[in-house]
Image (cartoon, rainbow, N blue to C red):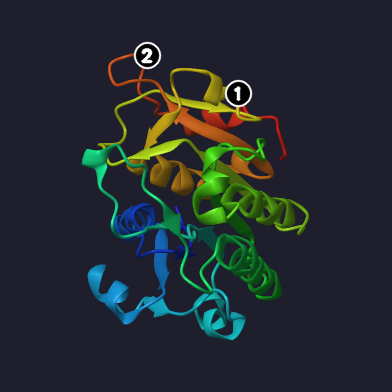
Amino acid sequence: MAELARSTVLVTGAGGRTGQIVYRKLKERSDRYVARGLVRTEESKGNIGGADDVFVGDIRDTSTIVPAIQGIDSLVILTSAVPKMKPGFDPTKGERPEFYFEDGAYPEQVDWIGQKNQIDAAKAAGVKHIVLVGSMGGTNPNHPLNRLGNGNILIWKRKAEQYLADSGIPYTIIRAGGLQDREGGIRELLVGKDDELLQTETKTISREDVAEVCIQALQVEEAKFKAFDLASKPEGVGTPTKDYKALFSHITARF
C-alpha cells in the first residue's frame, strides 16, 4: 500500500495546559502528522521544548501568525483569555477572590478578535479543517464565568464559534466541560448540546481526553460541521470510549 501523506496541523495556544497535550500527541504520531505550535512568547516556546516547529506570534496581530499558518492542512485553536486573580485575597477571612484581565488581553481581544484573525488567516491560506475548543455554558448570558473580570468570556467565545460555523471552512467545535488534569483514555465520554450536560452530575472532562478528541476530529469525517458539548462519566462508570467515529456519529447539531 502507498504510504499516506502526512497532514500538517498547527496548534495555537500550544503553551497552554491543553494545547501542550495536543501538540505532544501530534508529535507522538509523526507517522501521520507534522505538528506545529503557536505560542505567545519565547518563554512558552522554551517550556514546550523550543523546537523549530513552534512559532511565536500574537493572535491579535494577524501578520504575526501568518507564517505559522502557511502550508498547514488543519488548525486546532486552543487560545483563550486567562483571568488573573487580584492580589491581597485572604481565603481565611472567607473572602471570595476577585479577577481581572490584563489590558489588551480581555476575552473580546483574545477569544473574539484573536480567534477571528486565526479563522480569516486560515481561510486565506486554504486550510481544510478547523477544530475550535470552547467551553460549555455559552447558552446562558448570565453564566458566572461571564462575570469574571467583567470579561463576558463565554459570550465572546460563542461569537467566534458562530463566525467559524459561518466561514464555510469544515469545522469541529468542542465545548468542553470543566477541565481536569487527570489521566485520559479511561472514561466514557459524553457528548451533548445546548449545555444539557450542565444539568447533570457529569460536567467535567480531563484535558487529555479533550486533546484526544481534537486529534480524532482531524481524522474522522463524521466530526466535520459539528458542534458539541463534551464531558465524561466518572472513572469506573461505563466503558472507556475507544470508537470515536461512533461518538461523532451521535452528534447532529451544527452549532
Residue 18 coordinates in the image, percent (x, y): 37, 52
Q: Nearer the viewer, residue 206 or 89?
A: 89
Q: Secondary structure at mark 2?
A: loop
Residue 25 visible in the displayed image: yes
Residue 56 coordinates in the image, percent (x, y): 41, 80
Which image quarter: residue 252? top right
The CA span between labels 1 and 2 is: 19 Å
Direction from residue 23 to residue 73 in the image, left or right: right
Q: Nearer the viewer, residue 13 or 222?
A: 13
Residue at the image point whose x is 49% and y is 59% from the top = 80
Which image quarter: residue 189? top left
| Disc number lying in front (1 or 2) | 1
The three-letter code of the residue at mark 2 reads Gly
Disc 2 designates what residue?
A: 238
Residue at the image point whose x is 76% and y is 59% from the top = 167
| The C terminus lies in quadrant | top right
